[in-house]
Image (tube, rainbow, N blue to C red):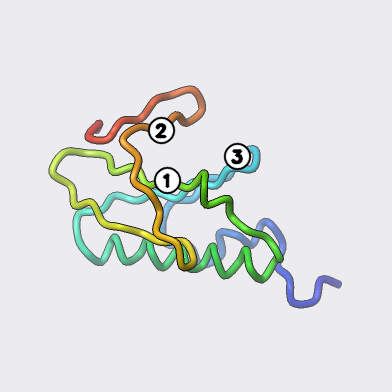
Amino acid sequence: MNKGRSEIGDMDSGIECTISKFAGDTKLGRAVNMLEESEAIQRDLDRLETWAHANLMKFNQAKCRVLHVGHGKPRHKYRLGREWLESSPVEKDLGVWWMRGST
């Protein structure tokens, strides 16, 4: 029995945003037009951090980035644990380059 620890499949339990897991990478995403939507992202980041802690795991914060997509969208700041996440102007995901401001 796994006392006090969750299974990897439980990682997305209670998550409000879209979460994708692939080859050791976890991505969390959501359209943000209002403050409530950015608060949902922060709640999910808090849930993921709590899950990792309960499973004696840790996210590699050096690889965690925020990519704001779309013109004129609010650019909220997010944290994972106590650390603020960096905003990135461009990210590569499965061979596709995403740039800030792209739609």
Q: List x then y, in percent, for residue 101.
A: 22, 34
Please name the amino acid that badge 3 sits on: Phe
Q: In the image shown, does 18 or 102 lie closer to the viewer? A: 102
Point out the tag, 1 or 3, that comes first from the N-terminus. Answer: 3
- Which circle marks residue 91 in the picture? 2
Q: CA distance from mark 1 to mark 3?
A: 16 Å
Secondary structure under the numbered disc 3 in the rendered image: strand
21 to the left or right of 5: left
Q: Nearer the viewer, mark 2 or mark 3?
A: 2
Residue occupying the far right of the picture? 1
Q: List x then y, in percent, for residue 52.
A: 62, 63
Which residue is found at the position 54% from the left and 62% from the top?
Answer: 48
Please name the amino acid that badge 2 sits on: Glu
Which residue is found at the position 58% from the left and 50% from the top?
Answer: 60
- Which circle marks residue 22 in the picture? 3
**For residue 96, what is the image quadrant?**
top left
**For residue 90, what is the image quadrant?**
top left
CB atoms at circles 1 and 3 under 8 Å apart? Answer: no
Which residue is found at the position 22% from the left and 64% from the top?
Answer: 35
Q: Quadrant of the C terminus?
A: top left
Point out the tag, 1 or 2, that comes first from the N-terminus. Answer: 1
Q: List x then y, in percent, for residue 38.
A: 29, 60
Secondary structure under the numbered disc 2 in the rendered image: strand
Please name the amino acid that badge 1 sits on: Arg
- Which circle marks residue 65 in the picture? 1
Query: Can you say whether 86 is above or below 55 in the image?
Result: above
Secondary structure under the numbered disc 1 in the rendered image: strand
78 to the left or right of 48: left
Q: CA distance from mark 2 to mark 3?
A: 16 Å
